[in-house]
Amino acid sequence: MTRFVAQHILAPVLVTCGVIGNVFNIVVLKSPKMKSSTNVYLMALAICDSMYLIFMFMLSFFNCENKDQFKFIFYSIPFGRVCSDLFGNTAVWLTVAFTLERYIGVCHPMKGKAWCTIRKAKIAVILVFIISLVNTFPEFFELEIVEYNDVGKNKPTVLKCKTTSFGSTSSYQIGYFWWYVAFFNFVPLVLLAVFNSILILSVWKANKTRRTLSNSTVIGETTRQATEQQKVTTMLISVVIIFLLCQLPWAILLLYKAYISANDMHAHGDSLRIAGNVCNLLVEFNSSVNFLLYSYFSSRFRRTFQSIFCKWKRERDRRRSLSSSSDTFRKSSSSKESTTATSVSSYRSKRGVLSDVSARENLLCQKL
């Protein structure tokens, strides 16, 4: 029941909303108005979150337990598992990267001018992806699809997922598993907790200083710029806090599984499956919520979003104003024409009256 609710009801809603929100993030952050080193990380994070959601959505419907799937679906499952891990792992270290960059920019502003540039941010994104790919690459050789004859069934040949001999070795299961857990879970969580705590403290001190100087008029413009930067920092802090809250249960579950496996203890399979579905749902929620955070905290993001996606409204208003002005011009033109016609007719009538009067005077002079 948990799997059905999590994977077939809640996951499609989260994936749909998350992919749409991340597409909005990519379009807005790609705008020339949003050029900054931080936004390079956020745009790369939106791409990785979108790809992670797409592959997780695919795996929620296509899995090794369903024997009635098409053949190409079976062979795509190992690839989908690795790709979802790759983009999820890249998103983890991208979060660490922009947190570290914000820490340098806030706590060491002189160094930040040299290090926090758009070019170096792009290089850092590429390096993060390459490192994640190298560390995730062994998973491509972990699972394989095999065919076997199922006696007594209508389908003599059945496909199933099987762990490869490489993936079955104890050195891989122990060594790579612990390296994976440490490199993609605990090291990032510790770094994010440390740097995020420092950023929270710096924002608190900055807000206290700004309240003290709020009555000053000399530094008004500087205060406004600092306020905008503090909003960006607060937004990134919120992104990291939600990331920690959504990733921490999954890290604890991995530790628990490792402890059970190392001590040959009996585990309740259903309980672990339920916890795994809930943890996956939390990670999907984390990949779907960033658009709301950007829209709430960043006024520049909201303005750019409105300027990009509200063009149709402005175009409609412009057309309405043009049509109304043309109607007004037509009415004024018609009124001018009627006025002109009236004046011409009155002029003609007055001219006729004057000609009659002059004719009578001439006749009277002749008689006299």
Image (cartoon, helix red, strand yellow):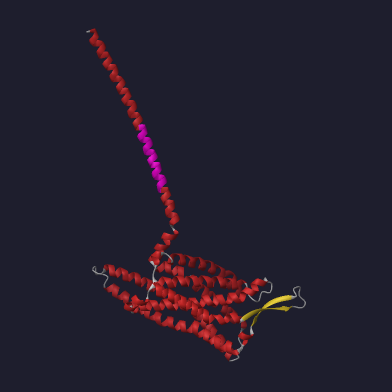
Residue 174, quarter of picture: bottom right
Q: Quadrant of the N terminus?
A: bottom right
Residue 103: x %, y % from top left = 37, 78
Give the residue at the far bottom of this rendering: 263
Query: Does residue 210 sit above or below 353 in this rendering?
Result: below
Does residue 282 appear in the picture of this structure?
no
Q: Nearer the viewer, residue 24 or 259?
A: 24
Q: Which residues are magenta?
A: 321-338
Residue drawn at (61%, 77%) of the image: 78
Q: Nearer the viewer, residue 114 or 306?
A: 114
Give the residue at the far right of this rendering: 152
Residue 292, quarter of picture: bottom left
Q: Is 299 on the left-hand or right-hand side of 269?
A: left
Q: Nearer the viewer, residue 295 or 349?
A: 349
Residue drawn at (38%, 44%) of the image: 325
Residue drawn at (57%, 81%) of the image: 139
Residue drawn at (40%, 42%) of the image: 327
Give the residue at the far top of this rendering: 367
Residue 146: x %, y % from top left = 68, 79
Q: Main secondary structure of the magenta part?
A: helix
> How many marks overall?
0
Q: Is 105 on the left-hand or right-hand side of 45?
A: left
Q: Is 3 on the left-hand or right-hand side of 248?
A: right
Residue 182: x %, y % from top left = 50, 85
Is 54 magenta? The answer is no
Does residue 75 appear in the picture of this structure?
yes
